[in-house]
Image (cartoon, coloured by chain):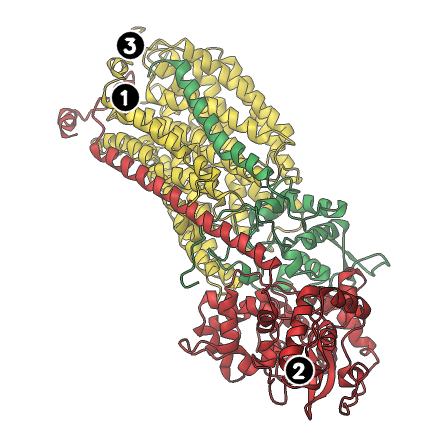
Chain colours: A yellow, B green, C red
Amino acid sequence: MPITMGLLLGLSFVVSLLALSFLIWAIATRQFALDRAHAATVFGKGGADGPDTDGTHLFDTTGIDRVSARPVRLLILGAIFWLVLGSTFGVIASLKLHWPDWLNQAAPLTFGRMRALHLNLVAYGWLSQIGIACMFWILPRIFRTPLRAPQLPVIGFWIWNIGVALGALAFSQGWTDGEEWLEFPWQLDTLLVLAGVFFVVPLVKTARAREVDHIYVTGWYFLAAMVWFPCLFFIANLPGIHYGVEEATVNWWFAHNVLGLWLTPLGVGTAYYFIPKIIGKPIYSYSLSLIGFWGLALFYSQVGIHHLIGGPLPTWVVTLSVVHSVMMFIPVIAVAINQHVTVARNLWALKESLPLRFISFGAVMYTLASFQGSIEALRSVNTITHFTHYTVGHAHLGAYAFVSIVMFGAAYHIMPRMVGRDFAHPGLIRLHFWLVVLGFAIYFFALTIGGLLQGLAMLDATRSFAESVILTKPWLEARSVGGTMMTLGHILFAINVIGILRKPRAIAQSAVAAE
Amino acid sequence: MNRYLPLVLIAFGILAFATLMLVIAPGIQMAQRTVPEGLRPYSEQESRGRKQYVSLGCVYCHSQQPRSPDQAPDVERGWGRPSVAGDYVFDRPHQLGTMRTGPDLLNVGVRLPSESWHLTHLYQPRAIFGWSIMPAYPYLFEEKAEAGPEDTVVVLPEGFGPESGVVVARPEALDLTAYLLALDRTYPIPEDALRDDGYARKESGS
Amino acid sequence: MTRTSKQTASRNVKPGEDFEPWESHNRVPLLVIWIALALGVWGTALLFQDQSSYSVAQGERAADEVAAHDAPEGGAALFLANCSTCHQPNGVGVRLAVPPLQDSEFAKAGPEVVAQIMLRGIDGPIRVKGFTFDGHMPSFAAALDDDEVAQLASYVAGRFGGADATLGRDQVGELRDAHAGSGSWQGGAELAGLVPGLPTQPAMPAMAQAGPDPAISDLIFAGKGDVWSCASCHGGLGQGAESTPRLAGLSQGYIVKQLRDFRAGERQNEQMSFVAKELSDFEIEGVATYYAGLRVDSTARPALGGDLARGERIALQGDWSLGVPACFSCHGPSGFGVGADFPALAAQQPAYLASQLAAWAGGHRNNSPLGLMDRISRALPESDRRAVADYLASLPAVPAVEQKAMARIEGGGDEL
């Protein structure tokens, strides 16, 4: 077999392997010993200032939360707005797949545009925004210093939301860049980039002003995501230079990195913070945190081309992505041990804390979604699942069951601490939990089974293409049922959050921390 | 880890490496290969139709990348030979797609070369395929009492058209159809063509 | 792992608000490192495996490129590849169907005559060695270059006619120019002008010179209010493409039966049912007559990645281990079709053929006489379906081509 250029390039995988080996060696030989001494002493000056006394921040013992509260509140509200809107569009798109003649009289209502609206509103309106809210809440806390330049993110919030709103208008009018995950017209991308500057600057300033030596693992994920996402977004949206199959590789390099290097760090970082925070116990192992984080960086960044397996691009790029996808088992197992062991030893906390229920459920879904993704990237499996609804189910396992549900929990944890009182109706939170979990279960299993059947039918030349369409219909209907339940859950989420914000203060005085 | 700058720099470096591997290197490799002789750029009308295709989001249900017979029976369904990187050099934005809720379209202009078939199908897919779940696109057409001399009348079976008068195609429908009919990658490919060959196996017995 | 749990398990109390997360220092479980190692080895192996797949595919592409340019060399090889499926390897022909070459008047007339027949094909009755045949020979003008025609003609005339003369490439070039655009030989009657001393040749039957009925012609080229035109999908000359079949040269009876089956729902295809439901018996017969009479060169070529040698074996000999008879045993030598029940296969679009074999195998098509094709298709594995479809697509169209028609195809289908 000749040694070709492609093989040499493919062996760049070895570079990732070497980097990982170096990391494991470094851990084993205690190169990080200096850090380790600090790891346990994150928590320095807290409590010295004494509890907040004006009664509005019952839980805020340090005065840090007060500064973050305004941008975080705005970002959460904005995120919820887009969540409700975006998931409504999702339900409409889902219904259209089995009622194709419903709502069909104008171009803005067509499936292709509804789907683009759904994806972009939930990705950029909801997930990104709630993730940024968590950054603004968590980073000052782990750095033990109030947020710097807190007025900037407020400006950023408005620019971001105007950008998303204009984007929504643009899609419905058919103005799109035409690639999945990159639909935003590049002219509007500049708004998002500008907003990003307003978000990143205060966070970097806060990081540089931190009052702890050690950066807790959540901080690694957040700080890295703040570098990764702008780079990805900028390169992928550069107008005029990408074309043809090269554009497709950029497309999927971006689309998967938006999940892997943006939404995943947001979700994993948030879970890494709130799980020990709520339970009150440390994370299992600092070394595993290192493997989990650097493994994610090394492997996740090169998986994108598994969306083009069997496509018109060089074999070696596809293989490279397949291999890296499977290597994702390593960081995922590391994170799983770290987070799940902490929860499993403290199951009592699940009974006491509703936010933890959301967050640890989401964390488990991260493990499952990643395992599924690694297996799905194998050529033999991908042949069946590629081009089918199975992939859509997988995407929602990651973006919804993992990131969104972690974010629900984070919001439920943050809100009482931000407004200084508790939720009046925990029952509604429980209902929200069960609606989205059961709804998602229906959604996921319907698409997974339907997608597999569809894929098998498409692989069999003796079955007509029509068969692959007809057999999916009942599963698509089930998906609509699940999706509707999830959307009802989101409306409940909105009611809960608005409810806690609107509650008169007098009642709040008697509230107890019900965590 | 306790330092901000190294963390950020290494994170950036890793992403830069991934970009080199996933975007820049294959981009350079593909740009060096011969463009197939049979490929031609889209005409003005076809480009307008392509914009319709993009803006209506056809890509969310239709791929444009037939797979190799080593992997899947795409060729037997009439979707055309496995596509190669050179087939797409005129495509901006690319519309490779990752879903086959509907069939692959890279060679639909060869398989279904009838303009009037496409107009019927765009106006109401269920007029032809009762089981179809494709959206209808009535807003690409208009109803008229009587067709003018320039009008393209849509062939419709009973029960699918208006009660009186005819359905004629708007320019948008004609552009979109022109694009669909231009989808033809059945010409031979150059020897140095690139595609994912990961499913190719030495055939036993030959 | 257990040590830490003992320490903490006893303190299941809610933490204070000022608790901030931190990491304890448990060691990395060995299992994680083993998994990492195993995956690393697996990943490297996969890189090499896929690299070998790439080499295989690259080799196939190169071989296709070579095959496209290098046909078999030498008269004998060319004869086997192009002539023997009809005229038989020993040149004795097929009784009542394909004229013999051995000792035939035409082979004896020398390579120049043979070459001229090959360049134009025959379409009309011809009398050879005392028997009259319904001559339908394809033109090889497009399939073979001057050199190949020269070698082949010399070989045929020498082996079967005992002629000593050989033909050069340049002479063939001149013949090709002289005959360009003349269409096929109208049976033995026209050839009599070329070969002196032939026995009396049968007269050409009176051809219906008039085109089809205007109503039929409208239906074919413009469609009716409620159906698309035939030509809009099947091409201006019924040549077909991909999964749309070639109609040109299919027998009238076969086309009529299929259209009736579509109309009655006995053959399923949503698009053809849409059309056939609106057709009267008169229209069906008119359309069928039109397409049966079309003389169009093949536009099909192997495209399914099938193994042509395997396809040829199935077409010529069948595969008795699978219980599959030779295609040509029913569909006629070279697959040019027999009657209403056995359509012509030569030059049919490969994707269409493969899709029909798949449809029979999957039970989506069941209008084959006696269920013959159902059984055969079920017996063929997927790779054989592609192989035989590709092989049949590589055969020249029968009957021969009307040059004017080809000029129209090549000139662009717009006017059609």
Q: What amino acid is found at the position of numbered circle 3 in the picture?
A: Gly
Mark 3, other Cα within 10 Å: few <14 / some 14–19 / many ≥20 = some
Could you tell me how far apart the alpha carbons at marks 1 and 2 are, in whole angstroms?
A: 87 Å
As drawn, the label of residue C161 is: 2
Residues tagged 1 and 2 counted as in contact (Cβ below 8 A): no
Q: What amino acid is found at the position of numbered circle 1 in the picture?
A: Ala
Q: Can residue A81 be seen in this snapshot?
A: no
For mark 3, what is the residue? A44
Give the number of the mark in front: 3 or 1.
1
Among the 4 quarters of the image, the one containing residue C185: bottom right
As drawn, the label of residue B120 is: none
Q: Can residue C45 be seen in this snapshot?
A: yes
Could you tell me how far apart the alpha carbons at marks 3 and 1 are, in whole angstroms?
A: 27 Å
Question: Which residue is drawn at the image coordinates 47% and 56% (left, top)?
Answer: B70
Give the number of the mark in front: 1 or 2.
2
Read off the chain for label 1.
A
Among the 4 quarters of the image, the one containing residue C227: bottom right
Along the line of sight, which residue is nearer the eye, C366 or C190? C190
Read off the chain for label 3.
A
Callout 1 secondary element: helix
Query: Which percent across, then down, holds residue B161?
Result: 71, 63
Are the numbered discs 1 and 2 placed on the same chain, yes or no? no
